[in-house]
């Protein structure tokens, strides 16, 4: 992470989401799920303790090393892919075949990670989610920051789609810099909730 300090991931971490979003996610999660996520970290460890398989994509070497260390400390074994930003969006097509089901279909795809690539990642995920599966988009609204403008096109399309049903959880969270922001995590189910 050039220019940033790598903050250590604690033992038994929770995702960097508003607590209500984490609670909702856990309520819909199944232990047999296969999950793909863009942006590794605390969520990678948390998911790995709750579902069958987690594939996570990371583009920063220092943070990748920290997530690998935390996975060992937490005794979980996610598959963590270190890729360049050029390879970032397409990583869902490069993940090991046996870590997905039915031709690279996932039960849940979580889009977090590198902000400028989130829209493209969400679009790449749409046909990789099985019927009845979930697309989780972090920071679909983030006050004082990059969130809403970044997500407007795909969020608008999903909200208007008859193929996806959404739940939106908004609340205050504290960022790593100590600032409090209003954040929204959007959960979209392929099919009806």
Image (cartoon, helix red, strand yellow):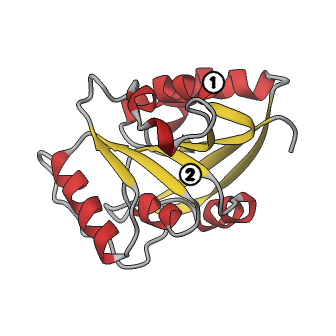
Query: Residue 15 at x, y = what percent?
Result: 49, 62
Residue 101: quadrant of the picture = top right
Mark sitting earlier along the chain (2/1): 1
Q: In the rendered picture of this protein, how many numbered marks are placed on residues?
A: 2
Q: Is residue 60 left or right of residue 184?
A: left
Name the image quarter holding the C terminus: top right
In whole angstroms, how far apart are the C-alphas of marks 2 and 1? 26 Å
- In this rendering, the answer to whether 16 lies above or below 145 is below
Q: Is residue 21 left or right of residue 79?
A: right
Q: Residue drawn at (37%, 75%), measured in percent from left and top?
A: 75
Q: Residue drawn at (60%, 68%), measured in percent from left and top?
A: 19
Q: Residue drawn at (63%, 24%), measured in percent from left and top?
A: 127
Q: Residue drawn at (72%, 47%), measured in percent from left and top?
A: 168
Q: Residue 101, which numbered label?
A: none
- Name the foreground residue: 130 vs 85: 130
Q: Which residue is mark 2?
A: 183
- Name the foreground residue: 81 vs 7: 81
Residue 159: quadrant of the picture = top right
- Label 2 crowding class (10 Å Cα cut-off): few <14, some 14-19, many 20+? many
* Residue 111 seen in this snapshot: no
Q: Residue 127, which numbered label?
A: 1
Query: Residue 154 at x, y = what percent?
Result: 61, 24
Query: What secondary structure is marked by label 1?
Result: helix
Q: Is residue 4 left or right of residue 133?
A: left
Query: Residue 156 at x, y = what percent?
Result: 69, 24
Query: What secondary structure is marked by label 2?
Result: strand
């Amino acid at each position: 992470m050039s220019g940033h300090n790598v903050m250590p991931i604690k033992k038994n971490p929770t995702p960097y989401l508003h607590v209500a979003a984490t609670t909702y996610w856990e309520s819909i999660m199944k232990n047999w799920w296969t999950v793909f996520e863009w942006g590794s970290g605390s969520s990678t460890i948390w998911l790995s303790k709750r579902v069958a398989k987690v594939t996570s994509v990371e583009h920063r070497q220092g943070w990748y090393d920290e997530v690998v260390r935390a996975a060992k400390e937490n005794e979980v074994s996610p598959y963590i892919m270190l890729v360049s930003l050029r390879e970032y969006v397409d990583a869902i097509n490069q993940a090991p075949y046996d870590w997905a089901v039915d031709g690279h279909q996932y039960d849940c795809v979580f889009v977090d990670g590198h902000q400028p690539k989130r829209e493209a990642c969400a679009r790449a995920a749409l046909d990789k989610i099985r019927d009845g599966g979930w697309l989780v988009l972090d920071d679909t609204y983030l006050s004082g920051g990059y969130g809403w403008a970044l997500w407007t096109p795909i969020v608008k399309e999903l909200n208007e789609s008859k193929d996806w049903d959404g739940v939106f959880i908004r609340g205050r969270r504290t960022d790593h810099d100590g600032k409090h922001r209003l954040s929204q995590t959007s959960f979209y189910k392929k099919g009806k909730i």
